[in-house]
Amino acid sequence: MPVDRSHLIDPSRIEGVNAHETSFLYDEIFTRSSYLPDGMSLPSDAVVFDVGANIGVFALFAHAVCPDATVYAFEPLPPVFEKLRHNTSVYGVPAHLFPYALGDAEGEVDFTFYPGYTTMSATSSHAATEADREFIKRQVSDAAREDLGDAAELLDEMLEYRFREVPYVCRTRRLSDVIAEQGVTRIDLLKVDVQRAEADVLRGLDEAHWPLVRRIALEVHDEPGTPTEGRLALLSDELRRRGFEVPPPAGDGLVESGRHSVFATRPGSSAA
């Protein structure tokens, strides 16, 4: 089981866009170590790329686990980026912050921002508002619905409001361009959680830079009947071809929704 590291950061000092999301992210990242599972460790001076940083909870986690870590955090949406900047500043995380997304080309893309569920925000070409709203709805257990009582019928209305769509145009860059610009010589952990754009991020990594990456924590969308169907096998095979060990996806309760947590490690990179 993952080590509980929830004592390392005071969650009351983390500033978020929505309290329910901040609580979820803290539990997911610190308590359940969702991006650093049992068996995957980091060197004390780790170089960490946090792609899809949101408000910076994983950046805080990386700093707490490895105080000498160098963190590169990417968050394209302005309201969320400001929280990322604030939280890394409050905790003294010497992170390099980038107010743009990573993708397979340099340019600008349309984003769909959900003010009530910022973690579900996505490039408009990958956004699936109804599907993501239903995904959140399914997370509300039958017991919780009973606790809601008469208010349960208001759940749809609440989610409709939280998933209201706000358009943004954000810059995108290629991962390899950032690596070259920043003079990065290794990436001990590449964490990617970008709402169906994970394949785009990996396509932005040139052949010359793949050997620099030692570990990958990747959320992969493989949703039946959508353009992502079959992606899990394709990306897993690609990572194995590039020399990574890729165990079966973690059974984290998200599989039925088409979301899979994939962890890839180069042989010899597991020890701290």
Image: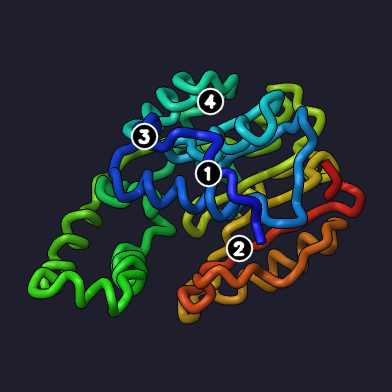
Mark 4 or mark 1, which is nearer to you?
1
**Mark 3 surroundings within 10 Å by alpha-carbon count, few (fewer than 14), some (14 through 19), many (20 or more):** few
Q: Which residue is mark 1?
A: 6
Residue pushed farthest left?
Answer: 150
Mark 3 or mark 4, which is nearer to you?
3
- Mark 3 belongs to which amino acid? Ser
Q: Report if the CB atoms under discs 3 and 2 are less than 8 Å apart.
A: no
Q: Secondary structure at mark 2?
A: strand
In the visual, does 89 lie left or right of 128? Answer: right
Q: Which residue is mark 2?
A: 261
Mark 3 or mark 2, which is nearer to you?
3
Q: Report if the CB atoms under discs 4 and 1 are less than 8 Å apart.
A: no
Q: CA distance from mark 3 to mark 1?
A: 12 Å
Q: Secondary structure at mark 1?
A: loop
Whole-percent x, y for residue 101 in the image: 50, 39
**Which is nearer the N-term, disc 4 or disc 1?**
1
Q: How many marks can you see?
A: 4
Q: Secondary structure at mark 4?
A: strand
Closer to the camera in the image, 131 or 188? 188
Closer to the camera in the image, 157 or 131? 157
- Mark 4 belongs to which amino acid? Leu
Quarter holding residue 54: top left
Say the numbered circle drawn on residue 97: 4
Q: Which residue is mark 3?
A: 12
